[in-house]
Image (tube, rainbow, N blue to C red):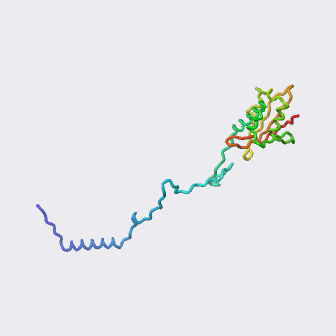
Amino acid sequence: MKRKVTLGKSSIASALVAGAALGACAASGPGFETVTTLPKPPRHPAGTDVEPATTLPAAERRGTTAAGLVVLETPADPNAARAVVSAFFHALVEESPHALSAVLTPNARMQNGSRRESAASVWSGRFARFDYRSLTGEALYRDSDLQVTEEEHDLLVRVPIGVAWGARPRMLGDEFTFRLIPSGASFLIDEVVEDYRSP
């Protein structure tokens, strides 16, 4: 059985007033931006960097956190310095100017007392006067006695010589000091100081 619902005049009037009030609120209320009204970001071709590249400061030996971003240099490898010194003495025992030139800079200097000369020419002369091949198989120094210190970008390597000369003619001083300068991933000898002046 269907029931018939009838509204009185006062109910219809109330509904009309409520509808008109809602319409007035919608018309006078604040407007909100929609997605279609927001500005579009600029478009970039594929593979284009949107952010600018970061420029790093120059590498330094030392730095502090107060400086903000700090780039530190790679510490010098003392094992590379030891290998160069070992190659130097190996070249002496072989009396090989070629092997010696491989570990010396082109302008390497040799200092004996107050005399300072080209290292290559000094050793060529000493190879002609002494028999360094007689030192083959002899421990010229102990690796544990090497002292490696840093000075700016160079390395100083102090090498005490441990040869007992006995009746043999003296061919080396009691101590060598090498100044090594960086060369790629390794070093080259730029200066040799020896506490002995050969006759």
The total number of labels drawn is 0
Left or right: 32 in relation to 161: left
State the image coordinates of residue 184 (x, y, percent, origin top left): 68, 43
Image coordinates of residue 182 in percent, x first then y, are: 71, 43
Q: Residue at point 16% right, 69% down?
A: 6
Q: Nearer the viewer, residue 83 or 26?
A: 83
Q: Position of residue 25 (x, y in %)?
A: 33, 72
Q: Nearer the viewer, residue 4 or 45?
A: 45
Write the residue at 84% across / 30% down.
130
Which quadrant holds the C terminus?
top right
Quarter occupied by the N terminus? bottom left
Please tell me which residue is depicted at 77% across the width and 39% down the height of the picture. 178
86 lies left or right of 115: left
Examine the image and state in which quarter residue 22 appears: bottom left
- Name the outermost residue toward the right: 199
Where residue 143 sits, quadrant-wise, is top right
Q: Is residue 180 shown above or below 167?
A: below
Is 196 on the left-hand or right-hand side of 86?
Answer: right
Residue 181 coordinates in the image, percent (x, y): 73, 43
Q: Establish if 2 lies above or below 167.
A: below
State which quadrant residue 92 falls in.
top right
**Residue farthest to the left, as pictured:** 1
